Amino acid sequence: SICEVTDPEITTIDIPVEELAQKAVCAMVNLLNGKSGLQRDVATLSPTLKIRQSV
């Protein structure tokens, strides 16, 4: 997998996702509109994605 938790004590991983998510949303909007050069403003997103270990 891309992200593995090897320490069982770690229960939360903080991953910065704002820039990645904005690029992904822009790419999807561009695909839906069929225009690769289209620029759209993306709503402000949480700066981190919290992944919690399932119990």
Image (spheres, rainbow, N blue to C red):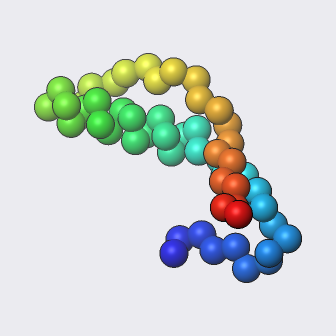
What residue is shown at x 51% (from left), y 45% (from top)? Answer: 20
Toward the front, the furthest residue is 55
Toward the right, the furthest residue is 9
Q: Would you identify the image quadrant in which residue 34 lies?
A: top left
What residue is shown at x 76% (from left), y 56% (from top)? Answer: 12
Toward the left, the furthest residue is 34
What percent of the width, then of the height, locates residue 29? 28, 30
53 versus 37 height, above or below: below
Q: Toward the viewer: 52 or 32?
A: 52
35 lies left or right of 3:
left
Q: Toward the viewer: 19 or 14?
A: 14
Name the image quarter holding the C terminus: bottom right
Q: Would you identify the image quadrant in which residue 26 lies?
A: top left
25 lies left or right of 10:
left
What percent of the width, then of the height, locates residue 53? 69, 62
What percent of the width, then of the height, locates residue 3? 60, 69
What percent of the width, then of the height, locates residue 1? 51, 75
What residue is shown at x 43% (from left), y 39% (from top)? Answer: 23
Q: Is residue 39 visible?
A: yes
31 lies left or right of 14:
left
Badge count: 0
38 lies left or right of 6:
left
Q: Can residue 35 be seen in this view?
A: no
What residue is shown at x 59% (from left), y 29% (from top)? Answer: 45
